[in-house]
Structure formats: structure tokens, C-alpha cells
Image (cartoon, helix red, strand yellow):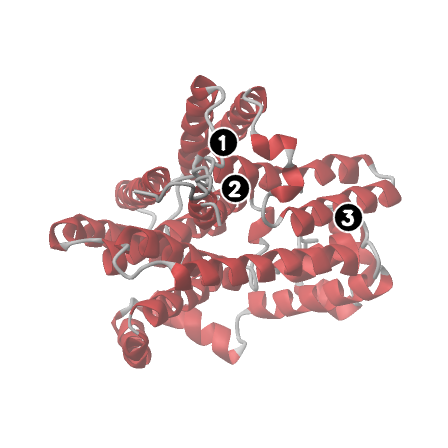
Amino acid sequence: MHPPGAMMLPMAPPPADPSPDLHPGNRSLTRACLVAMVLGCYFSVAAMHILLGLAFVSWVSSSMPALRHPLRTPLMWPMGGFVLMAAFSAMLAWNPTSTKEAFSFATPLLVYMMTRDVMAGPSLVNRSVQYVIWGGVLTGGLALAQSAFEDQGVMISNNLNRYVTLSGVLLLALMLNLSRALFGANTRERIPLLLGLGVILCALGMTETRGVWVGLVAGCATLIGLWRPRALIALPVVLIGAYFSAPSSFQENIQSTLNGSDPLVEERLCELDIGIDIILDNPLLGVGPRRVPEVYGDYRAPEEAALASRIPKHLHNNAIQIGADLGFLGLGFWFAIWISWFRRVARSYARVDESDHASRAVIAGCLAAMVGFQVMGLFEYNMGDSEVAFLALFVFALPLAIEAYSGD
């Protein structure tokens, strides 16, 4: 009770839902299309693009606050700057291919904005993580079965037709699966997670994609460091044990990489040298999106031409490829995106209550997945692989979807 004459202070209104369902039917359709797109990343690039288009149309028609105030969305400044640099670079290149490809740099931005908006909330984010894990287990299982029935030997692929694509999507699913097993699962839930983890890990190893193996180690180290830092001491022992228990083809792959006897290693080093030369000759805005194959031959020395009979479609490194495409301006925005994301998500993880196992599992898993994605990107241009890039940007958005729900 307040004494007579006391001044009553107005109560603060409850925080507004950051993503009100102005058109709930459209938002549900957008969610369904995004989930189907996630599964399409594992099985069909054509279906993935169609479903993304349907999700975008549905999302735009629902008049979201994110569309009315796009610059208030976290990371929009560096992401928007990156897309703008791609557009400027394409215009300066004055090339139809570059102009068309410039639009592809905007697609990950759409995936991020839609996912952060319509998946806001712990329950939706947790279900989204589950879909990514299910897709990885199903894809890994089908790839292993295909390998057994078609007698492919140790090395496997699937209908994605590229070992790098298959291993890239499996890596993302594996990190989320392992995080849930470590952080967010009780004993009953942990058993199916560990079984699924075994399927994904086996399929990932049998792709024999060495850059992804390095990303796997980096992602696992990140997760273990967040879960039990002291357990990192055991990681070298586990790696040594895995090496000696692996098939001989795995060991030969690693040995040829370390001693430089693999011709592919030398070819990749030549690509990096040429990529740096292209950047230094076109420092501001690069040669234009996806124009590296057109100029690559101008930089090859005779001895380098003898090492590789073909001109690569891209340079096998995210930073070098983006620098060659978009110059130092585009590369600067690229680094700004990832530095901002890691800082923001690391702070979110630090703020989560230790009793909130589900949120800790999601955020830690996404951190590990993006570490693995970036380390893989030192050896492959996985940002240019649409299946891997779309799935990565979906995972990229999930911690910020939790943040959007909490109003941070």
C-alpha cells in the first residue's frame, strides 16, 4: 500500500517482442522454407536456392521490423559494406559475369537477416540446431551406405558430388552435435547424439579432405576449451592415437602434406603466390567478383604452368580469394564481419547462466562451427561453395537469434 498523497511512478512497459508476428502465417512459412533450405544444403543445391527464394518472398511480405530498420540489425554495417564493395568492384570490372556474381555476395546477408528474425527465441533456435544435426547424420549415413554398396573404397562422396562440399556441411553439423552432447544433454539424450556423432565423424574422415580435418581439430579444441579447459591437455594424445589407428591411406595423406611430396600442396602454394600478386596489382577493389580465372594465366610463370595443367576456378583460401575479387576494401569488411561476430557471440556466451545448458550448447556449438569453418577456409574457398556457405550463415545467425529474443 502507498501512503496517501504519494506520487505513483508509472510502471515500465514489458520489452517488446523484437520480432512480432504481424503476419504469423507468413512467418511460419518463412521458417518452414528456411528449415527445408537447411536440408537442401545437404542434398540438392537447386532445391536449396528455390526454397531460399520462397523464404525471402514470404519474409518480405510479412513486413518485418528488420526490413523497416535494417541498420539496427547487428553486423549490418560490415555486412552491408561488404555487399557494397562487391557491387562497386563488379561495376568497375564492367563484366557481365562479375555483375551477376556480385548478387551472390548479397545472398548470405539475406540468409542471416531472415534466420535471425524468424528464428528468434530459445525454442526455435534449439529446434533449428536439431534440424542441422539431423541433416548431417542422414547425409553421413547415406554417404557411408553409398560407399559400401558402390564399392568406392575408403574415400566417399554423395550426391553433392564434391568432397569439399560434403565435408564442409558435415563439419558444421558435427560441431553442433558434439556441443549438445557435451553441454546440453542428459544421459538419455546423449546416447543418440553420440551415435549420430559417430556416423558424421566416420563420413567426415572418409572424405579425405585434409583442410576440413584441420578445421575439425580447431573446432573440437574450441569446444573442449569452453567445456573443460583442462581437458585440452588430452587432445594431442587423442590426435596421435587417431593417427596411428587410421587406415594407411589416411596416414599417407597426412605424411605427404607435411613433407611436401604431394604435388597438390605445391600447386596450392603457387595459387596463393599468384593470389597475392593479383591483390597487390589491384589493391583497392580487386579484379571483380569471380574474375580470377580470367586473369590467372597472366601471372603464371613457365615452371608454375608445368605444375598445373588447368587454371583453377578459385584460389583455395577465403581471404586470398576475397582480396583478389574485391581488393583490400572488400577484405577489410570481411574481417570486420567476423571479428564483430566472434566478439559479440563470445560476450553472449559469457553472459549465459551456467544453468541454461541449452543456450550454452547452442552458442558454444556455433562458435566451434565458425572456428572450424574459418580454419577450413585457409585451405578451401568454402565461402564460395553455396551449400556450405548457406548452412554456415544459418548457423552464424542462431546465437544472434537468441540475443534478439532476449532484447540484448
Extreme-left residue of the structure: 188
Q: Which residue shows up at 64% across the image and 38% down it?
A: 70
Instruction: From the top left corner, tell me how far across and down residue 196 is, in percent.
Output: 24, 49
19 or 80, which is in the foreground?
19
Label 3, on which residue? Answer: 85
What type is the residue that disc 1 sits on? Met
The number of discs equals: 3
Q: Earlier in the sequence, mark 2 or mark 1?
A: 1
Q: Point out the image quarter for the N terminus.
A: top left
Q: Which mark is residue 48?
A: 1
Q: Secondary structure at mark 2?
A: helix
Label 2 or label 3, whichever lies nearer to me, is: 3
Question: Mark 2 touching mark 1, by CB under 8 A?
Answer: yes
Q: Secondary structure at mark 3?
A: helix
Q: Quadrant of residue 296?
A: bottom right
Q: Is residue 255 above or below residue 51?
A: below
- Distance CA(mark 2)–CA(mark 3): 20 Å
Question: Mark 3 touching mark 1, by CB under 8 A?
Answer: no
Q: Is residue 159 left or right of residue 130?
A: right
Q: Is residue 345 left or right of residue 330?
A: left
